[in-house]
Structure formats: structure tokens, C-alpha cells
Image (spheres, helix red, strand yellow):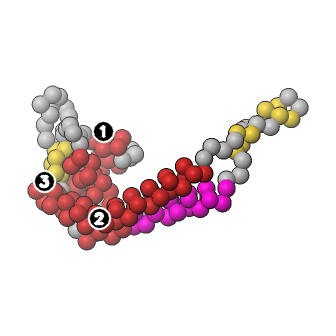
Amino acid sequence: MPTLVVRYVRNTIFMPTFENPTPDELATVAQLRASLRSFAAATAEVAARHQLTPRQYELCLLIASAPDQLTGRDVAEALHLSANTASELISRAEQEGLVKRGTSTRDTRLKPLALTAEGRRRFLATFNDLRPVRARLLAILQESVSLASRLV
């Protein structure tokens, strides 16, 4: 773990800074970020082959993996979107026949989301085609964690 350095000059405390990162630490972070960009690009490419945008794929994944009824507010929080952007994403996905809004049995104001048969088909095709890409990313993440643990 990097050592925290605090400087004092004439009774003034300056913002803490960390020592310079090691070349191995920089290389690890650069490799990790490159891997994440590569994963995002591969996801976009595979999703496009199945007529999904990356965000639509994320939405379908979120709905498919939700243990409970998922609402627009849940989508906004999980995907780090504004409420308006999440609502637009859901509306477009609904217009394309990927998702449908239901009625909650607990609260009639809530509109839980579900995948349509077409949404599920396109989502699963994308999900399955991304298996090798996820495996490569996981291998890189494991390697990065291993290297990072040796740097500490």
C-alpha cells in the first residue's frame, strides 16, 4: 500500500499526496483499463450483431438478473443514469419490443420491467456470444489482482 505523505509548511497542512506509483503499478492499471475498453468495444460489436445497443444489452442483463421486480428507478441507479435517461432507454426498448412494463402487485404506481420473448432471444444470443470475451477479461482481471497483491 502506498505511503501517505503529508507536508507541513509554516503551520499549514497541504493536501495529502501519495508517493509516485511504481512502474509495475502503472502498467497494471494501464492493462486493466485497456482490457475494460476492449471488453466494452467487443460488447458493442456483438450486441450490434443482435440488433442491440450496448445500453440495451445492459438493460436486458439487468432485467434478466434481477431477483425481484425491477423498476425504472432501479435501472437508473444500477446503470448510473439520470431518471430521464433511464426512462428514455426503457421507452425505446419497449418500442423495439425488447421489454414490457407490467403492474406491481405491491404498488400499482410501480411498473416492473420484464423481457419480452424477442428481448430475451436477442439478449441470450448476445450473452452467449460474449462468453469468450468475458473469459478473457476475467483472466486479465485475475492476473491484475495477482500482480497487485505482489505490489502491496
Regarding residue 134, the answer to whether it shows in the image is yes
In this view, the mark in front (3 or 2): 2
Q: Tell me if residue 93 comes above or below residue 10 in the rendering.
A: below
Q: Secondary structure at mark 1?
A: helix
Residue that carries the numbered disc 2 in the rendered image: 130
Name which of mark 1 and mark 3 comes first in the sequence: 1
Name which of mark 3 and mark 2 comes first in the sequence: 3
- Magenta stretch? 22-41
Q: Secondary structure at mark 3?
A: loop
Helix, strand or loop for the magenta stretch, by majority? helix
Residue that carries the numbered disc 3 in the rendered image: 116
Horizontally, is 77 left or right of 59 in the view?
A: right
Find the distance from the CA under tag 3 to the CA under tag 2: 21 Å
Horizontally, is 94 left or right of 89 in the view?
A: left
Q: Residue at x 13, y 41 (%)?
A: 102
What amino acid is labelled 2 in the image? Leu
